[in-house]
Amino acid sequence: MLGYYCRLALKSFRHTPGLTALMVGAIAFGISTCIVTLTVYHAMSGNPIWWKNNVLYAVTMDSRDPLPTGSLADSDSLPDQFSYADATYLYGSSIPRHKAIVATMSGALSGAPDQSAAALVHLRATSMGFFRMFDVPFEYGGPWDAAADRGPEPVIVLSRDENDKLFGGADSVGRSILLDNHPFRIVGVLDRWNPQPQFYDLTVRSFGNASDAYIPFASGVQLRLWPHGHVSCWGADDPHTYPQLIGSSCVWILLWVELPDAASREHFRAYMDAYWAAQHKMGRFQRPRDNSLWPVSRWLTHHHVVTDNSRLLLRLAFAFLAVCLINTVGIELTKFLRAAPLTGVRRALGASRRHIFLQHLVETAVIALAGSALGLALSWAELDAIHALYSGSNDAYGLLAHFDPLGVLWALGLAALATIIAGLYPAWRIGRVPPALHLKSQ
C-alpha cells in the first residue's frame, strides 16, 4: 500500500511541478537556515571539555584596590588573572591533582631548516599540568616534566601547524630551535587541538586560533618575555621594567586547578582564604573577600560566551522555518483542494477517509524528505562558503562553521517532523470533502 501511495504522490508531482518545487524549496531554505545557525550556536555554547566539568576549576581572587567611598561593587569586573606573586604562591599548593599557571607571551622562532627569517609566534607560557589537565593530544613526543618547570629548562612544545611550517610536518622531537635567539629543545608536537570556545583563556577573546608554541612559565620569566595578552593594573602600579612588572600588583596570569572531589575543593578554598587573610593584614585585598573556583560550564556563562545576539539569531532562524512551513501548509491545502474531484471519484469507488488521509500524508512526507535533503545540501554549501570566506582569520564564524552532526540531526529531525505535522491538516481536510459534491460537477 505504501508503494501505491508513493506512485500516486509522484503522479501528483508531475501534474503540479511548479507548486511541488515551491514547497520543496521553501522547506529547504528554512532547514538550511536553521542548520547553519544551529551549528554555529551549538559550537559556541558547547563545553569543549564537558567530561571534566566537575573537576577543572578556574581560580579567581579579588585583588583590586578598595572601592571609592559611595561606589557600588562591580562583581562583573572581577579580575580573571593574578599578579606574579599571588599566582606563584597559589600555584605552589600541593592540594590539586594537577595545576596550570598560564600566561600569553610572544617571541620569534628561528633556526629551522630552510627558514630564511625569524617568525613571530604566539606563545603560551605555562606548566606541565596544562597538557594533562586539558587532555591535550600529542602527535610526537609529549609534555615536559616537572623538573623543567622548576629548572627552568629551555624546552618547547610546538603546535602541529607550527611544526608543519618549520619542519614540514616531520617528527622534530629532540631538535633545537631558537626562541628570541636562545636555544630551546623540542620535546613535543601537538596533534590537532583548538577547542572552541577557548575556555582556558577568555581574557582577550572566546574564539580564535590556538597558540603556536608552549614553554615553561619559568622560562618565559627567565627570558623576561612581556605578557602579550590582557594586563590590568590599578593604583600606583605602572611598570616600565620587567622587575617592576614581577613585583607589581598588575594581573596577567591565569590559574587553573584540577580538584577531583569535594574534600580537595574545600582544602583549596581554605588555602586561598588563608592567603587572602594574610595579604589583607598586610594592607592588600581591601575589598570584601571574593575567592572563587569556577567549573568550566559556569566559567563560560560568567564570561557571556554565548551573547544575546546569538540567541536572537537562533530564534529568528526557527521563526523563518515556521514561516516556510506555514506557507507550505497553505500551498499543500490549495493543491489538495484543486485535486478534490479526483479524490471524490476515489471515495465513490470505495476508498475510505483513512485511505485518503494516508495517501495525502505520504505525499506530504515525500515533500518533507525532498526538502530536507535539499536543505542539507544547501547548508553544507553555506557552511563551506562561510569557512572559506573567513579562513586564515581569527573570526569565530570561520572557526565554527563546520558540519556538526548532532546539530544537523536535530535540525533535520525537527524540520521533517514539523513538515509532516503541518501536513496533517491538509490531509485531514481533503478527506472530509463529501464525494457527492464533486461527482455532481463531473
Image (spheres, rainbow, N blue to C red):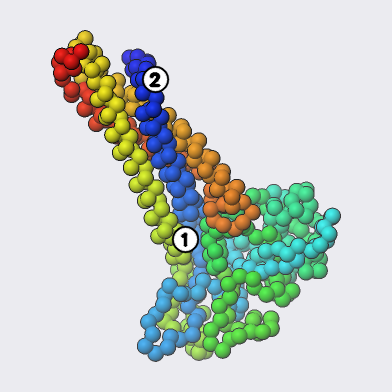
Q: Quadrant of residue 322?
A: top left
Q: Amino acid at mark 1?
A: Val
Q: Quadrant of residue 320?
A: top left
Regarding residue 169, the answer to whether it shows in the image is: yes
Whichever of labels 2 and 1 marks the residue nearer the N terminus, that label is: 2
Q: Nearer the viewer, residue 389 or 95?
A: 389
Q: Nearer the viewer, residue 268 or 23?
A: 23
At 41% across and 29% down in the image, what residue appears? 21
The image's mark for residue 305 is 1
At 80% across and 56% down in the image, what residue appears? 174
Q: Which residue is mark 2?
A: 14
Tell me where residue 52 appears, x and y as whole percent: 50, 55
At 40% across and 51% down in the image, what residue appears? 314
Alpha-carbon distance for marks 2 and 1?
A: 50 Å
Looking at the figure, which quarter contains the C terminus?
Answer: top left
At 47% across and 67% down in the image, what residue appears? 293
Tell me where residue 427 appears, x and y as whole percent: 26, 26
Residue projecting furthest to the front: 441
